[in-house]
Image: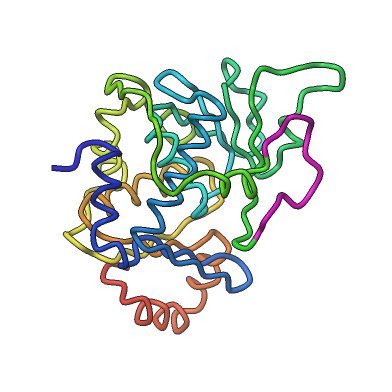
Amino acid sequence: MTSTIAQLLTLISRDGGQPRLTWYGTDGERIELSGAVLVNWVNKTTNLLVEEFDAEAGTSVATDLPPHWRTLVWALAVWRAGAELRLVDAGDGAALAGQPDVVLTDHPAAWAPPAGERSRTELVAVSLPALARRFDGDLPGGAVDAASAVMTYGDQLGYVPPADPGATALSGAGVALEVDHAALLGWGVEHAGGGAGTGERVLVRTSGAAGAVAGLLARALSVWASGGSVVVLGPETTVALDGDPARLGRLVETERVTVA
């Protein structure tokens, strides 16, 4: 039975060549990650979090990233390191209670401290375009460019601190109560409105609404825990396809979606 993120990643990596995450973004962008490739991305990112920021149980990692395939990778990595993911809706960073240890964002300037001040929060700039090799824009002093930094870490998981099932795994926007690591996968199934059938290929719509990332995380966790895969539509793509049933039908057929 799958009950931890470590076990979930092992499940995802079985039949490693099979797709586990397919993403449709703006301008026709399509990204497909097999189980093996998805786990490699998570391993690299986990290694960065642990080695660069000493991430472990009790480490708070805040993010205002939108619904996106990279957001899923970073979430899995935060949880594999045993840390807490705090979801923040765009523009709400100033309202955070307490300073996070790390911030993951695609607009780092909004998190930079005022001139002349220093912050203990580590800032990670995440580029969303698929082929980005570096962050496109100015980085605040000390910020880590995820596009280049993640690639320097190994595909195999290195040292990871001992797990603490009672430590907080998820909190923030779209999450009614803090969720600990022991309850994370159960939360995903419940928040998604139930688990998917075994091995289903599930179409996941997203939006730019408040709390939308929590919905994406829950659905992906529930599908992966049942051995399935997700086809995720970005917010703009969701709107476009919902307005074009013929195009949506072609996508469902092409991707062999079983739950739409």
The residue shown at (48%, 29%) is: 50
Quarter of the figure with the N terminus = top left
In this view, the residue in front, 155 or 257, is 155
Q: How many labels does the image show?
A: 0
Question: What's the coloring here?
Answer: rainbow
Q: Is residue 137 magenta?
A: yes
Q: Farthest left residue?
A: 1
In this view, the residue in front, 164 or 51, is 51
The residue shown at (43%, 18%) is: 58
Q: Where is residue 227 in the image (x, y as percent from the top left)?
A: 22, 56
Q: Is residue 16 above or below residue 162?
A: below
Quarter of the figure with the C terminus = bottom left
The residue shown at (40%, 42%) is: 76
Q: In this view, does 29 lie to the left or right of 116?
A: left
Q: Is the magenta stretch mostly helix, strand or loop?
A: loop
Q: Position of residue 102 (x, y in %)?
A: 58, 27
Q: Position of residue 117 (x, y in %)?
A: 81, 16
Q: Where is residue 135 in the image (x, y as percent from the top left)?
A: 71, 49
Query: Range of the magenta residues?
Result: 132-144
Q: In this view, does 127 lie above or below 245?
A: above
Quarter-wise, where is residue 130 in the image? bottom right
Q: In this view, does 144 lie to the left or right of 34?
A: right
The residue shown at (76%, 17%) is: 118
Q: In this view, does 216 lie to the left or right of 190?
A: right
Quarter-wise, where is residue 184 in the image? top left
Q: Is residue 108 above or below residue 215?
A: above
Q: In this view, does 219 lie to the left or right of 103?
A: left
Q: Is residue 223 magenta?
A: no
